[in-house]
Every structure is written in C-alpha cells, then in structure tokens.
C-alpha cells in the first residue's frame, strides 16, 4: 500500500493507495476510511487502486510528480529573486497571493511561509542559510527508469532528477564557477531590466502551465503501466485521493478528476479541452520567462524542457 502524508499525515490523516487483493482490501476498508485524510467535498483520501503492486507504483509516481513540482517552484523562485531582485517579503507576498488562485496547493503554501521565517540563531532569513545541496530517496530515479522502460516522455520529472544530481556536486560547482570566471564569464544578470509586477504575473502563468505538465506526465506513466499490467486504474480516482493528506495536494486536482470523468480514456491530460485552453492562454508568458532565464544565465530546465515537450506534442508533423 502506498502511503503519503509524512508527519502531518500521522496527525491529520494520509492519502492511502492500497493495491493487491480486492478481497483483502474489503477486510480493512472501514479502518482505512477512518485513518485517511478527509476532504469535505470529496470524502476520504483512499480508494482501492488495483491489482498486484499498483498501489506502490502509484505512490512512486506521486513522488516523481512531487519532485517535478518542487523543481518548478525552485525555478520560479530563481527567476523572481535573481532577475526581479524580489525581497523575501516580496516573495512571501507573491506566493501567498498565488495560493489564493489556480496555484493553490500545499507546496505553494509552505513556500510562501518559508520566505517569512527568520533565523532563530542568527541574523537574516533562514532560507538564505540553507546549503544548496540535496540528495534523494530513490523514488524519482525509479520513476524516470519506468519512463524509459515504458517509452513515456517525462521531461519535467526527469529534469528534477538531473537538477538534484547537479545540486549534489557542490564542491565541483564551486570550482567550476572559479574556472569560468577566470576565463572571462561575467555576470550577465546585470544587463536585465524588468518590470517586477509584470515578471510576477508572467512567472505565475508559466508556473501553472508547467505544473499541469508535471501532473500530466505522471498520469501518462500510470496509464502506460496500467495498460501493460492490465490493472485498469482509474486516473480520476487517483486525482481525488491526492486532494488531501499528501505533498502534491492542490486545488486543480479537482479539474484533473473532472477531465478523466469526462473521458476515462484520455490519452494525455494536455489535450483535455479545458486544460488545452489554459495552456494556450499562458504560453506567451511561459515563453517570455524561459527566454528571460536563458538570457540571464539562469537554469530553468524544468520549464524549458516542458516547453519543448509542448512544442513537439502540438505538431502533427515534427519535421519539414
């Protein structure tokens, strides 16, 4: 059984993804319904996922989506901080405002909170004291391996894994920066002049557009594995049980559920008419942010590769 919720889930209920024997599930269903996180408009965050190891597979993909989501938020932060020169107060206000709309989610909420936390043992904000080096637990790596084995493109999720690999090379990056600087590489950020409010507006639009892709790629992986194994997984139900208790809970999961309710055989979430319109409405802002980041020397691999994914997907004929 896949379980997502962490420390908070132990107090307020997790999202539960049981798989395996349906008969065994029925024996403990009443317990799981009480243990799971409760969402007022959609009930307990638990459902029978499917046969075999489907529950654990779904949880693994859930984690891959989370990695992609966190990478995209980090890229949004980099652009706002480095190009827009936003202060921590500005960043807190921007993310808090975003959390009132289409980007409302657990990760956006806690990101807004983080910007306001002072260092209790020293001066300044805590976020500036965090070492820019991270690792991983392995689930995102397994997700990317499955993408390769299933021949499913998942560039947003894959980019988050590469970003973590590079993040872990702290000492190597420090030395590389010295070499490039001595070779004449200057600070190209100094050449960028932007309207802060327009930048915040564009980043918001771009972040929502790429966030849709992270979830869509995860759903594509689940769909492909379900077809391979004959699990007959209900993607709309998975979106429903992720609405509470888990790290990727977000308001737009309601809309993902409705998309799969409208068309259970939807090949790709991006071609659902409602999501397609939202992507088209935001693509200009998205392209502006990617170009701005490139010209500023800021790595936005998640946003950039997601844009390439979209541009390839929307072509009936790729070349010529």
Image (tube, grey):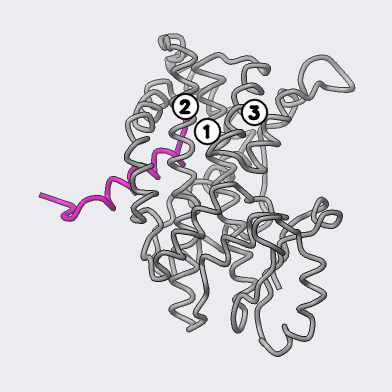
Q: Is residue 62 magenta?
A: no
Residue 41 vs residue 197, the one in the foreground: 41
**Separation (CA) of disc 1 from disc 2:** 8 Å
The correct choice, above or below, for 180 with respect to 316 in the image is above
**Is disc 1 in contact with disc 2, using a CB cutoff of under 8 Å?**
yes
- Mark 3 crowdedness (10 Å alpha carbons): few <14, some 14-19, many ≥20: some
**Residue pictured at 63% horizontal, 51% vertical:** 248
* Element marked by disc 1: helix
Mark 2, residue position: 298
* Element marked by disc 2: loop
Decide if residue 306 is on the left or right side of residue 55: left
What label does residue 96 carry, if any?
A: 3
**Is disc 3 in contact with disc 2, using a CB cutoff of under 8 Å?**
no
Query: Where, quadrant-wise, is the N terminus in this rendering?
Result: bottom right
**Which circle's residue, 1 or 2, is located before the other in the chain?**
1
**Which circle's residue, 1 or 3, is located before the other in the chain?**
1
- The picture quadrant where one finds residue 188 is top left
Q: Is residue 315 magenta?
A: yes
**Which circle's residue, 3 or 2, is located before the other in the chain?**
3
**Separation (CA) of disc 1 from disc 3:** 17 Å
Q: Write down the region rendered in magenta.
A: 298-320
Mark 1, residue position: 75
């Amino acid at each position: 059984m896949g379980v997502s919720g962490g420390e908070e889930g132990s107090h307020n209920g997790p999202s539960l993804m049981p798989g395996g024997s349906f008969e065994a599930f029925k024996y403990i269903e009443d317990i799981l319904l009480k243990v799971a996180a409760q969402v007022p408009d959609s009930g307990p965050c638990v459902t029978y996922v499917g046969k075999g190891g489907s529950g654990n597979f779904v949880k693994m993909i859930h984690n891959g989506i989370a990695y992609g989501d966190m990478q995209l938020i980090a890229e949004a932060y980099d652009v706002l901080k480095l190009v827009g020169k936003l202060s921590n107060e500005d960043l807190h206000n921007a993310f808090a405002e975003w959390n009132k709309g289409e980007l409302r989610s657990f990760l956006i909420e806690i990101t807004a909170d983080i910007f306001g936390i002072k260092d209790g043992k020293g001066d300044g904000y805590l976020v500036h004291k965090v070492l820019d080096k991270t690792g991983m637990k392995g689930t995102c790596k397994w997700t990317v391996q499955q993408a390769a084995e299933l021949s499913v493109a998942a560039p947003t999720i894959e980019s988050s894994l590469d970003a973590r690999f590079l993040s872990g090379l702290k000492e190597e990056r420090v030395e590389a920066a010295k070499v490039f600087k001595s070779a004449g590489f200057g600070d190209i950020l100094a050449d960028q002049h932007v309207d802060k409010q327009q930048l915040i507006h564009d980043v918001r639009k771009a972040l929502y557009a790429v966030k849709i892709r992270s979830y869509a790629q995860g759903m594509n992986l689940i769909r492909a594995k379900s077809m391979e194994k004959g699990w007959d997984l209900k993607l709309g139900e998975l979106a429903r049980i992720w609405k509470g208790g888990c790290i990727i809970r977000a308001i737009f999961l309601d809309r993902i559920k409705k998309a799969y309710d409208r068309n259970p055989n939807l090949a790709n979430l991006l071609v659902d008419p409602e999501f397609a319109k939202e992507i088209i409405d935001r693509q200009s802002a998205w392209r502006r942010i990617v170009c701005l980041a490139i010209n500023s020397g800021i790595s936005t691999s998640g946003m950039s590769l997601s844009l390439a994914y979209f541009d390839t997907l929307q072509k009936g004929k790729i070349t010529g």
